[in-house]
Image (spheres, coloured by chain):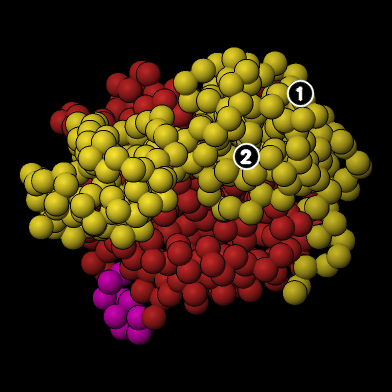
Amino acid sequence: MHWLDHSTAFFLSELSFYDYGSISFWGHNLSNSLANKYSTNICFCMKNRVGVGFRRDIADEFLHNDNFNPDFIEFAPENWMGMGGYWKKILDKAAEKYPVTCHGLSLSIGSSEPLDYGFLKELKVFLNDCNVEIYSEHLSYTKSKNAHLYDLLPIPFREDAVKHIIQRIKEVQDILERKIAIENVSYYTPVGAQMQESDFIKSIVEESNCDLLLDVNNVYVNAFNHKYDAMQFIDDMPLDKVAYIHMAGHEKVSDDLIIDTHGQAIIDPVYDLFEYTISKIKPIPVLLERDFNFNQFNSIVDEFKQLKAITSKHWEVSHVS
Amino acid sequence: MYLSQETKQLQHKLANYCRTGKYESIEGVSKSRVKQYRRLVFNNVKNTLNQAYPITVEWLSDDDWLFLVNAFFENHDAQTPKIWEMPREFMEYVAESNFSEKLNKPALNDLLLFEWVEIEVHTMTDVQLEPYLLKGDYLYDTLVLAPEYSLQKLSYPVHILNADKAVEQKGDWFIYVFRDVDSGVVQFLNISVLHTFVLEKLYEKPQSLAELLPLVSSIFGFTEESQLKEHVKNFIADLHVKGALIGFRK
């Protein structure tokens, strides 16, 4: 998450997401037949779509750089909701130019306190006003004892947490009247774990009828930090529920620890894991996340192109219909 | 509620550690790794506040600033889900906790307010205006002002002086902060109490100066109305040049 700067004192933090795939056009209330119809169309329309996180530092690139043409943009609704003025104008221009997805930060799906219904109400209006096609959130908590912490904390992998979160995702989907996608997060230490991370994610996604936003970099980071097999982890995911993928860079801070920073270029092993993943699933949107270190913008364009090339190689060949 | 007390406690303990930096054993947690969470969470809050209050950061010693940030994060339950609004809660917390006195920095509250108001006016929701004319008469047409604005009273002139020097000029200082309707840039004007009154009334009920001046005259006890008229007319003309007066209605 990062803030930014216009005129003297100004800022804003960011994170990201997107999804389409499986059944929904977020048609939570659609009948099965309609949903299936959309499913077919979306699968065709959305194949090989690669988006880039929309950040204030690089807003001009999205609006004026003719050599940079992401298929969609993603931003955190919390960073834009209720905001007018200069940045509202920029957001409106971007939303007019690109399809939009939103990746939330503050829903705190894992918290013990009740959902913030006022926030959800405002969020629903915002998502509809911006024609947001996909809304996703993190499988984490950011609020504890009625206080926001503004960062993602790891939920204990436990059966009671699974049930708690399933019920909350269902409630959120009912309120927003759309299906949401939940992202596997990176974590640096387990907390009171009583089950495997993969079982934790799988149970929640399958039983709450939400989609999975598979962050491939997070899988790599967690596999490294907690010494498990990343490909096996991918295999253990409910791949039919993966509706969206995130890709990003990270930082190795010691011999045995990687931090998920979104500030560096994607490394080859993460590209390899990405290729392995997409070879197993149907075409879905893919997002490149970058939250800071924007000074070498051409390298971000190169990363975007590389993701396009990989998805084209796998998905345009096998899914032309 | 499916969450067990034990799981809730685990979550609260981790969150509490992130807020305070005081570690209390948490089941299954790596003590060396958990430090990353305190670092990431605290830095996120601190960086946000640093960017919101660059002048205050520059003015206070590093220790004083860190003390305020730590006290805020440890003791205040942040309510807004939008991190960009969190600095407002910081400003309110510092004022309510009387830290200006504790740190012997009398201008602290005013400086935070001054910095926050810029963010507030810069980001405040757009106000939709009825159509208006770009040209008109300062005296007899209804005046249309920049709709996104704030009028503030300060005890120290931190908007024109370094906060340490501003302390020597304690008094009633008024600032008019508005957002340029085209560029979105925020401007500050140092104004008098009379100007503040005029602006308050024009924002309360859009009207012409001719309609407003009798009230201004009676409140401020002017005997020479032509002088007042000339003075306020010049003020309004200046607002027009600066972009605060954006138009007229007949």
Look at chain B in the picture and name its colour: yellow
Residue sitting at 42 percent across and 50 percent down?
Answer: B219
Q: B92 above or below A290?
A: below
Q: Provide residue A78's location: percent of width, then percent of height.
A: 48, 51
The chain identifier of the residue carrying mark 1 reads B
**Image quarter in which the N terminus of chain B is found:** bottom right
- Which marked residue is nearer to the observer: mark 2 or mark 1? 1
Q: Is residue A258 left or right of residue A119?
A: right
Going by the picture, which residue comes out furthest to the front?
Answer: B223
Q: Provide residue B181's location: percent of width, then percent of height.
A: 24, 42
Q: Are marks 2 and 1 on the same chain?
A: yes
Q: Check disc 1 and report its element: helix, strand or loop.
A: loop
Residue sitting at 75 percent across and 37 percent down?
Answer: B98
Range drawn in magenta:
A30-39
Q: Provide residue A151's location: percent of width, then percent of height.
A: 62, 43
Q: Is residue A83 among what the camera can see?
A: no
Q: Is residue A195 left or right of residue A271?
A: right
**Image quarter in which the C terminus of chain B is found:** bottom left
Residue B91 got which mark?
A: 2
Q: Is residue A135 among what the camera can see?
A: yes
